[in-house]
Amino acid sequence: MATVRKCLKCGLDLTDTSGALCPMCGTQLLQTRSRGIWVLAIFQFAVATIFMLIFRFPRMLIAVFGVMIMVGTILSSWMKQRPVGIRQTPSRTITHLTMFRVLSIGIALCSIALFSSVLFGFVIFINNWNDWHRYEGQPYHATTFQVTQVYFRRIGKGGIDAYASGMVDGNREWMGLRPYLPTVPRSQEELDALVPIGTTIPIYLFPEMKGRSRVRIYADTPPAEAYHRAAINAVNYGLASLAVCFVLLVFLIRARKLCFVDPANVPSPTIPS
């Protein structure tokens, strides 16, 4: 026994109809669904890309995330356009179309937030976890960095690198300036104004490390402990976000079910002769 397909708007029986429009109310069928899925996928990718670019995520990660969205969208579109199976339940009539659309948008946004919490939470956690192990157990002492020259360099299409050379305990050292700067400079002149030659910056010096990793901005919490706390916070906040998104998703899905009515309780529409 074949499953009955019905128009989501008017409830007309579409079991034997293969057209793109409902013959009763003119509502588009598969084309609208497919287009909506791809619009949602583009929105997801745009939001994720903007977020990743702002926080300077690796471009490879952006590409991987885009591929995942595309594969998921293709599978979702394919599943929605498959012929109705024998064992599927009969289609139900939507009684509150506007509410159904609002709740569907809410479900989509919660799904994006759920996926983003997992992705970005993991990236933040793993970065801080690696930095914690890099500095854990390394000898260090508090001292000062006296700036002798600052350098501004553009990275890619919007990123910048600001760093300085200077003297620490009578030796020449290098340090990144981004954690020290109150604002992001846009030119060498702005950087020179923010960090004049001769500026003294309190730092932690790690003499057994190499490059800019040897110098870290002084703070009340030493670097290793600060990275460890950040990793733990990423786990805690990530799990809390997952819980909130999951609860909202379940609530919205259950609320959307109230927009349907059992087809057995709906009289079949008649097509005027």
Image (cartoon, rainbow, N blue to C red):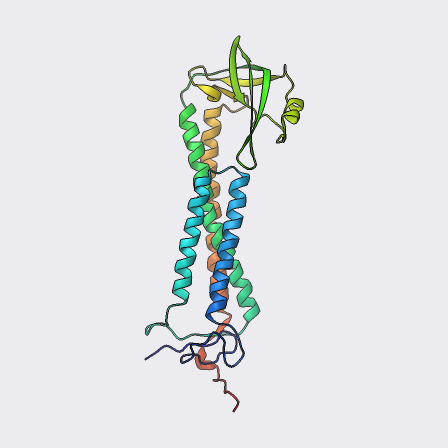
Location of residue 25 (image quadrant)? bottom right
Location of residue 119 (image quadrant)? top left
**199 lies left or right of 241:** right
Camera sees residue 248 = no
Q: Residue at x 48, y 55 (%)?
A: 41
Question: For the view shown, which residue lies furthest in the bottom direction?
Answer: 273
Q: Residue at x 66, y 27 (%)?
A: 190
Q: Residue at x 53, y 59 (%)?
A: 106
State whether residue 251 is above or below residue 194.
Answer: below
Give percent across and percent down for residue 241: 49, 47
- In the image, 163 versus 100, the foreground residue is 163
Camera sees residue 63 = yes
For the N terminus, give its image quadrant. bottom left
Give percent across and percent down for residue 3: 37, 77
Q: How many marks?
A: 0
State whether residue 149 is above or below residue 240.
Answer: above
Question: For the view shown, which residue lies furthest in the top direction?
Answer: 170
- In the image, 9 versus 28, the foreground residue is 28
Give percent across and percent down for residue 140: 46, 16
Location of residue 14 (image quadrant)? bottom left
State whether residue 93 is above or below residue 33.
Answer: below
- In the image, 233 versus 56, the foreground residue is 56
